[in-house]
């Protein structure tokens, strides 16, 4: 190791593992503003507190991702922005290195999400939209659309009700583009179980459904 530092000065310190710190010291400890680089491609430039990366700064990770924002104890924590190596962008609150709390994401695929995160995953209430027009607004659980929500499909039809694994599962209402709608039970995105289809002309068809087709008519009201 070379470049020993004294109280309140700027110096360059080279560590035995090849890492380099160039910045401010107080009593021999990193304090103030400094730049730190490692041999694996990680770099950080910003605030230091008592030898720790803490405060506002910018980090470039070995995989090429970049983070600009608040740090606590060497990890993103507080408000910040992450630019992923594929061009995706995450903006919001971070905790222990992962986006957690309210935030937004624009992924390289063009998918846009705004809402709650937990440990880097969509979790809580949020809204997601796809380039093809598909949209979902409602509950998320560990990165999956799950709970109560509204799905708008790319053809303009929609579903409102219980969602599991990103599809209609449970009870809900499907609104067709021609004005008709179905209210009843769903499994894996299709009417399954008891339900009533309301035609746009006022007629109703009730019964038992399987995979989107009625298999037992209980009532047909014209």
Image: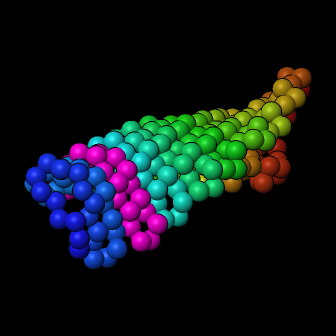
At horizontal 49% and vertical 47% (from top left) the residue drawn is 82
* Residue farthest to the bottom, as pictured: 16
At horizontal 59% and vertical 57% (from top left) the residue drawn is 85
Q: Quadrant of the C terminus?
A: top right
From the viewer's perspective, is 14 left or right of 43?
A: left
Please indicate, yes or no, whether residue 119 appears anywhere in the rendered image: no
| Colour scheme | rainbow
Query: Is residue 108 shown in magenta?
Result: no
Question: Relative to residue 220, is residue 5 depicted above or below?
Answer: below
From the viewer's perspective, is 113 left or right of 96?
A: right
Res 27 → quadrant: bottom left
Res 204 → quadrant: top right
Image spot of residue 184 (x, y percent): 68, 40
Question: Relative to residue 22, is residue 184 depicted above or below?
Answer: above
From the viewer's perspective, is 181 left or right of 147?
A: right
**What secondary structure is the magenta-colored segment mainly?**
strand
Image spot of residue 98 (x, y percent): 41, 52
Q: Quadrant of the N terminus?
A: bottom left
At horizontal 23% and vertical 45% (from top left) the residue drawn is 32
Q: Nearer the viewer, residue 202 or 217?
A: 202
Image spot of residue 183 (x, y percent): 70, 35
Highlighted range, magenta: 32-52
Query: Is residue 42 shown in magenta?
Result: yes
Question: Relative to residue 98, is residue 207 depicted above or below?
Answer: above
């Amino acid at each position: 190791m070379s470049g020993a530092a004294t109280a309140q000065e700027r110096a360059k310190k080279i560590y035995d593992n090849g890492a380099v710190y160039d910045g401010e010291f107080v009593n021999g400890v990193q304090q103030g503003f400094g730049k730190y680089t490692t041999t694996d491609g990680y770099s950080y430039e910003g605030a230091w507190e008592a030898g720790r990366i803490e405060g506002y700064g910018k980090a470039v990770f070995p995989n090429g991702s970049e983070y600009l924002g608040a740090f606590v104890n060497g990890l993103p924590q507080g408000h910040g922005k992450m630019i992923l190596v594929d061009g995706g962008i995450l903006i919001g609150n971070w905790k222990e290195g992962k986006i957690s709390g309210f935030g937004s994401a624009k992924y390289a695929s063009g998918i846009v999400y705004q809402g709650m995160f937990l440990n880097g995953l969509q979790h809580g209430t949020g809204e997601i939209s796809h380039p093809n027009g598909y949209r979902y607004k409602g509950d998320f659980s560990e990165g999956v659309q799950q709970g109560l929500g509204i799905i708008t499909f790319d053809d303009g039809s929609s579903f409102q009700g219980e969602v599991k694994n990103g599809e209609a599962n449970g009870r809900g209402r499907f609104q067709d583009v021609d004005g008709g709608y179905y209210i009843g039970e769903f499994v894996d995105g299709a009417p399954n179980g008891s339900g009533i289809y309301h035609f746009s002309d006022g007629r109703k068809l009730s019964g038992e459904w399987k995979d989107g087709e009625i298999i037992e008519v209980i009532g047909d009201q014209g």
